[in-house]
Image (tube, rainbow, N blue to C red):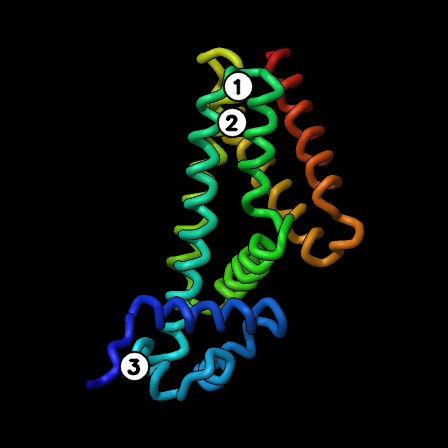
Amino acid sequence: MPKIVDAEARRQDVVDAVFRIIASDGLERASLREVADEAGLAVGSVRHYFASSDELLVFSFATVINRIVGRLEASLVNVEKEVSGTPEQLSAVLNLLGQVLPLDEELAVDACVWMAFRHAARIKPVLAAEAERSHRAVAAVVGRLIMLLSPGEDAVQQILVTEAERLLATMDGLCMHALLQPEWMTAQVCSDVLTAHLAAFSGLSASR
């Protein structure tokens, strides 16, 4: 009998190979041939699931976005369960923000791949739509988080938008620093920076 291949599992094997290549050598090396070698497959087998390098890269970009956004949305539910202003809520918020930072091996690979694709989208039009989706999806979660942390229901919309963008910029900066300088930008340092940022936001919100 011919061997039955689980198409979804095989696609995931190929995407995992893409992620390993990007994390170790960069996006430029993620050609069909290199990915096939990394996955232990023939190029023809990879082409059975992805007709071109562009199709493979777009699918891989979408996969890492879905992973990260899925974790963020699940973490947001936990934030919403906690009483506002409590240590438990702060812990839940820090856990949420940590989902985009390279705080362990799995998160580090996702963060590296995510950043690589976002940067590549600047010059690769085929990645632009996923890059836009990535920004909007992450920004939506962060915007909702800022609203949850803002005391009162009469906060000025523009202030909330500005604070959401400020937090997004902080997250991006921490992610990049932690990827480039992991010995310095440890999980504890990231937590300390985020805690200080949130404390400053709470102070500003309370004074308005």
Q: Position of residue 111 (x, y in %)?
A: 57, 55
Q: Which mark is residue 197?
A: none
Judge whether residue 158 can be spotted in this image.
Answer: no
Label 1: which residue? 150
Mark 3–mark 2 CB contact (< 8 Å): no
Label 3: which residue? 48
Three-letter code for the amino acid on which mark 1 is drawn: Ser
Label 2: which residue? 146
Of the residues tagged 3 and 1, which is closer to the observer?
3
Farthest residue to the front: give it: 1
- Judged from the image, the secondary structure of the residue bearing numbered disc 1 is loop
Three-letter code for the amino acid on which mark 3 is drawn: His
Crowdedness near tag 3: few (<14), some (14–19) or many (≥20) residues, C-alpha within 10 Å: few
- Judged from the image, the secondary structure of the residue bearing numbered disc 3 is helix
Residue 103 against residue 49 in the figure, above or below: above
Q: State the CA–CA distance, disc 3 to disc 2.
A: 44 Å
- Residue beneath the point at 51% across and 67% down: 19
- Residue beneath the point at 66% across and 17% down: 203
Q: Is residue 101 left or right of residue 138?
A: right
Judge whether residue 113 can be spotted in this image.
Answer: yes
- Judged from the image, the secondary structure of the residue bearing numbered disc 2 is helix
Mark 2–mark 1 CB contact (< 8 Å): yes
What is the quadrant of residue 80 in the picture?
A: top left
